[in-house]
Amino acid sequence: MNLDKYVISFFVIFIVVYFLESIGGFYMTTAIVSIEKQFQIPSKVSGTMVSAGDFGYIPTVVFVAYLGGKGNRAKWIGFGCILIALANILISSSNFLFDDKIVNTNSTNTQIESPILHENCSVIKGIFNTTEDLILCENENKNARQLLLSSSFSYCNQDINDERLKRRILSCQSDQVTNLAPTALIFFGLFILGIGRTMPFSLGLPLVDDNVKKRNLPMYFAGMFLVRICGPFCGFAMGTVLQKYYYKFEVPHGLTPVDPEWIGRWWAGFLLIGFILFFPSLLLFFFPTPKGKSTLNLVDKHARKNSKGQAIMPKSAKSKVTDFTKVISTVLKQPVYLGAMTGRILDVFAFKGFFVFLPKYLQVQFGIPQYKVNMYMGVTKVGSFAVGVVLGTVAMRFLKLEGRKAAGWVAICSAIAAILSFINAFVGCHSTLTTLGQNLDSKMSLTYPCMSTCGCEQMPMFPVCDKLGTVFYSPCHAGCPLTPTEIFKFINPNEGIQGNIFKNCSCVTSDDMEASRQFCSTQECEQKAVYYFLFMAVGGMIGGMAVTPGVLILLRSVPPMHRSISLGFNGFMVSLFATLPSPIFWGFVFDKFCLKWDQKCPDAKGSCALYDADPLRLWLHLLYAGMRTIALIADIYVLYHAKDLKLTEEEKEVLEEDPSEIRDIVLQPADAVSDPLIPDCEKI
């Protein structure tokens, strides 16, 4: 089989950019929790921010599909990918342009004297044995004080905690902690990204359809979807690695990736994606529209063309609008297309926002750190989905799924996936965070005699437990004092405090009066998490088995000449009614069950620190399973109308004088004579 060099080079480059473009959307899922924490925004705001891409996608996708199909689709795809690259770089820049610096209370105007640390180290002199140690103490005195004031946890000490509060107030007064500007910048970057992503999908799939034999189309689509699945897998893998690094290059003393206050280096992933995607996108501009007989159709081969092989465009704006509306009307009169699109809207509305906030739920419900959440989701959800796509493609080829058999296959897969989602509503446990959320008022009460002089008000959350399993909001709430030994751990670079055991904690009921993160039990939640991910993996695999037949049903349900615009219009409707409102809806659901807002400033609500986990678990999964069940009605509608639908047979369509008058798909034998105005194409 001789392949034109344009064919080989185009498909290689297209697969590369298709892969890189697919990383970004799922990488955003790994970054959303860190963005919420860094810029202190609630879930309903972050959900709106995630939907920004649809604000750019919706008004442009149909027109891009309509106009792009009549031009050089390689250049259109290249331009879209360049927009995506620039958008990723713009999103990452919010970290550098709006750094949440903390006011230095050591400055002459804001210095607050601390009775804990003195110039001569008199408080901690007793723990030093040599003159060299004492000199080291004096040199590190100021640094130790700053570490105490900015550490990820607080001790039971009124003076230091009062200074921490004053420092926070000064930071708020300086207006350095704000979420409006970075949120707006990320929103704008996602808006540009939404415009860019209209082009690879709505123009790329019809381009592949124009250049391969129909009997091989399921395998090509499976390959493309596998490449696109590898993108999300890499996105989760990237999130796993980058979440282990703090978003700043200087980590607060004592903070580790397992702590709820940890913020991963989310911005680095967007920066990397943007730079890598930019260069292969430029290569797509070097594909000229082939003239004469060629193996690569960059212009939609189903579009009406003149004798030179150029697509015929309506001359006036009015004619373009009239032609456009007639095409849309023709597409909407296809019952299979209408049913398949409705089902996809319902499925995507359920899935999109749910999946965006799923990492947050897994951290709350099972106590899994964010970097591990991303790794588990990448392996179970994305990996199983990839296996499902392969199995679905193989089943379609060997079971010869056509018409109602293919539609029935999609409906059955959707039903099983909905049932598995329903089962996960009853998989829960008592993690550190869920236990802390129970009777939170009593756990944070400042009236207990054991902590009445600690000054724990508005101190950061750093859960610790005693050996009896009692959970405390922070070492301060456990009554753990700031002793000379604890101070020494801050000024001695050789001492680590990860897994630190706090001693002499007055609120601890165990005999040893010790509290630590490592005393918090995790065995129950580790077992339940295995069940949850198992159901997720099986559901993802079964859902993936419906992808290839589902896309082919959508693609084959309209006249061939309208496939680009039908995909574009499908994307428009899915974005308008599903991907745009879905994250906002699920963000409101999450915020409804928030128990404790992390208020960095008095007038700012901030992000949610603790949730009412049990009702959140039930509502989350029952709503999701219910939406997936409603979508089955659309699948049954498609099943009823898909009797004579052919998915993998070779076809050649008749081009009427007015293609808008075509009501149904017209199939002809493979040797039928084609319109002489359309250049013949050698299929791959």
Image (spheres, grey):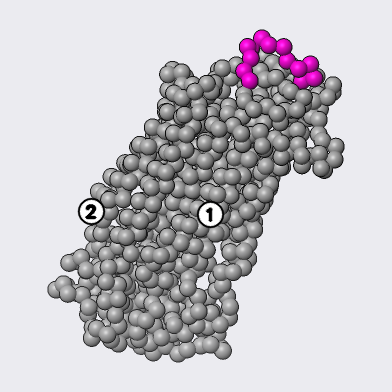
Q: Report whether 106 appears left or right of 322.
A: left
Quadrant occupied by the C terminus: top right
Rendered view: 171 above or below 317 = below
Who is closer to the viewer here, 336 or 141? 336
> x, y percentage for residue 77?
69, 38
Q: Is residue 223 visible?
A: no
Residue 339 is inside the magenta segment: no
Which residue is tagged 1?
581
In space, the residues marked 1 and 2 are separated at their CA atoms by 36 Å
Q: Position of residue 572 (x, y in %)?
A: 62, 44
Q: Is residue 519 visible?
A: yes
x, y percent for residue 483? 30, 80
- Chain part drawn in magenta: 666-679
Task: Find numbered disc 1 in the image and state the secondary structure of the residue it sits on.
Answer: helix
For this orientation, the residue located farthest to the top is: 671
- Residue 675 in magenta stretch: yes
**Could you classify mark 1 by the number of other residues whose Cα lies within 10 Å: few (under 14), some (14-19), or many (20 or more)?**
many
Sequence-first tag of 1 and 2: 2
Residue type (three-letter) at the residue carrying disc 1: Pro
Which residue appears at 50% of the width and 66% of the height? 41
Amino acid type of the residue that numbered disc 2 sits on in the rendered structure: Glu
The residue shown at (63%, 11%) is 669
Residue at 50% across, 55% down: 583
Residue marked by disc 2: 524
